[in-house]
């Protein structure tokens, strides 16, 4: 006598895949036109869920091909053909959809190592960039096909159960013997909850329109940046007054080459939909020739390794290295060079110079405090740059309604000079 109910293995795989697929479709929609700070985390989760669906679908296909299952329901030939077509198209969606997504990741301009759920390494497919556009088209088509198949599958199951009086739901819903109505409602509620979860797992912040700021001019001295400075640099964020322009007392201290000690910080803050995204550069070096008594002869040159940017999100950091942002393959370093250093009263100074970023040179001004104790100095400061002036942010990232033009830079470090 043929079995009248699917095996628990088939039932478990069926519902796991159904819930993940509903979640994945909703999560994919949430990625469309979304430039929020949560974008990269969403993509990582989308990739992880996709590979999970692929693996579970291959297991489900093996169960279908190599284990017994209930016979197909009786009915007209066209209904049986339609049911069979829907089932096989589901396998196409569940296998080809993730594979094309895998192709998209493998052929992306920025090659980001994939960690499934942030833990398990997953390799890229060894294919060329020419696969990207076809994979993108097919991937989108699979999502729409999945939605259509969901509707047909649910409608067919409900039709057999209540219009034709055939116990279809009891064959696939766990613990549904004699309780088809309640089980069906519960199953549909679970699928709806999975779909809602895909939209809500990384809720978008309210979208704020941030006007583009302009880069600070070389002269006259710029006002303080609009963003609140860090506490250690608050003293340098005020407008210069005439009484602050006096040169420091000539102590006869000669020019010295200062060596930056380890442990310094070079950070930055961008504003994404009104939310601050903080980061820092892990590798940078400074050549400082300086004396408070000989500012006209003092020079500062800071070289930043752009590949060392760290914002706490691996995919976002790798995207920063790509051609849309820093384009490190062509311009691996940013360089600030200052030859006009001015005293602004007390321990406050201002360095005017040039910032070279992405092959574009623009005037830049840095304000800093300097405290010298013997042959050791402590420095902390801020600056603001306009990313759009340097082409940091191409294509969809060029607009400033999502990512503001102004980027605040902060730094602090200790330095030593040869003993006098």
Image (tube, rainbow, N blue to C red):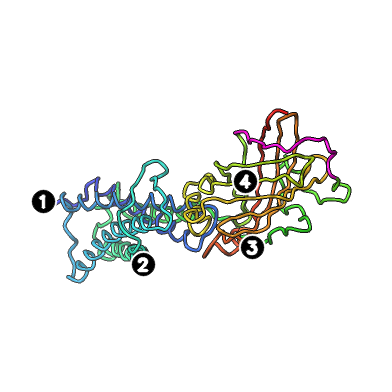
Q: Disc 2 versus disc 1: distance between alpha carbons?
A: 46 Å
Q: Residues within 10 Å of mark 3 (few under 14, many from 20)?
A: some
Q: CA distance from mark 2 to mark 3?
A: 31 Å
Task: Tell me where residue 109 appears, x and y as whole percent.
Answer: 42, 58
Q: Circle 2 sits in a helix, a strand or a loop, which is it?
A: helix
Q: Earlier in the sequence, mark 3 or mark 4?
A: 3
Q: Earlier in the sequence, mark 1 or mark 3?
A: 1
Q: If you read the primary sequence from the N terminus, does the residue marked by circle 4 or circle 2 appear first?
A: 2
The residue that label 1 is drawn on is 1
Query: Element at badge 3?
Result: loop
Q: Which residue is mark 2?
A: 137
Q: Classify 346 as above or below 22.
A: above
- The quadrant in which residue 144 appears is bottom left
Q: Name the residue that disc number 3 marks.
A: 209
Residue 32 pos. (x, y %): 47, 62
Residue 210 marker: none
Along the viewing direction, whichever of 287 and 169 lies nearer the viewer: 287
Of the residues under marks 2 and 1, which one precedes in the sequence?
A: 1
Which residue was labeled with disc 4? Answer: 302
Residue mark closest to the camera, 2 vs 1: 2
Chain part drawn in magenta? 247-262
Percent x, y of residue 204 = 55, 55
């Amino acid at each position: 006598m043929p079995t009248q109910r699917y095996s628990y293995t088939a039932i478990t795989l069926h519902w796991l895949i159904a819930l993940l697929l509903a979640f994945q479709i909703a999560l994919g929609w949430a990625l469309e036109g979304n430039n929020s700070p949560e974008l990269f985390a969403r993509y990582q989760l989308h990739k992880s869920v996709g590979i999970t669906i692929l693996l579970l679908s291959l297991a489900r296909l093996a169960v279908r091909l190599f284990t017994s299952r209930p016979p197909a329901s009786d009915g007209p030939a066209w209904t049986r053909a339609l049911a069979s077509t829907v089932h096989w198209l589901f396998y196409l969606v569940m296998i080809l959809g993730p594979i094309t997504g895998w192709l998209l990741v493998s052929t992306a301009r920025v090659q980001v190592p994939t960690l499934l759920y942030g833990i398990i390494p997953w390799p890229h497919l060894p294919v060329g960039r020419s696969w990207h556009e076809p994979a993108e088209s097919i991937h989108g088509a699979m999502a729409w096909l999945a939605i259509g198949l969901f509707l047909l599958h649910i409608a067919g199951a409900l039709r057999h159960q209540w219009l034709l009086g055939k116990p279809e739901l009891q064959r696939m819903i766990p613990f549904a013997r004699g309780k088809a109505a309640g089980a069906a409602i519960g199953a549909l509620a679970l699928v709806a909850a999975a779909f809602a979860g895909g939209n809500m797992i990384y809720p978008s912040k309210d979208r704020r329109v941030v006007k583009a700021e302009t880069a600070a001019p070389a002269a006259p001295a710029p006002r303080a940046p609009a963003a609140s400075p860090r506490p250690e640099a608050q003293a340098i964020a005020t407008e210069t007054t005439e009484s602050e322009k006096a040169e420091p007392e000539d102590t006869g201290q000669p020019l010295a080459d200062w060596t930056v000690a380890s442990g310094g910080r070079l950070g930055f803050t961008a504003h994404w939909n009104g939310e601050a995204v903080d980061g820092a550069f892990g590798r940078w070096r400074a050549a400082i020739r300086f004396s408070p008594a000989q500012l006209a002869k003092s020079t500062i040159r800071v070289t930043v390794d752009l590949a060392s940017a760290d914002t706490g999100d691996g995919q976002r950091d790798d995207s920063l290295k790509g051609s849309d942002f820093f384009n490190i393959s062509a311009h691996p370093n940013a360089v600030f060079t200052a030859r006009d250093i001015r005293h602004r009263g007390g321990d406050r100074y201002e360095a005017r110079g040039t910032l070279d970023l992405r092959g574009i040179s623009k005037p830049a001004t840095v304000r800093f405090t300097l405290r010298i104790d013997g042959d050791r100095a402590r420095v902390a400061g801020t600056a603001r740059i306009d990313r759009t002036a340097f082409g940091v942010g191409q294509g969809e990232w060029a607009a400033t309604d999502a990512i503001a033009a102004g980027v605040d830079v902060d730094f602090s470090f200790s330095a030593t000079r040869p003993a006098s």
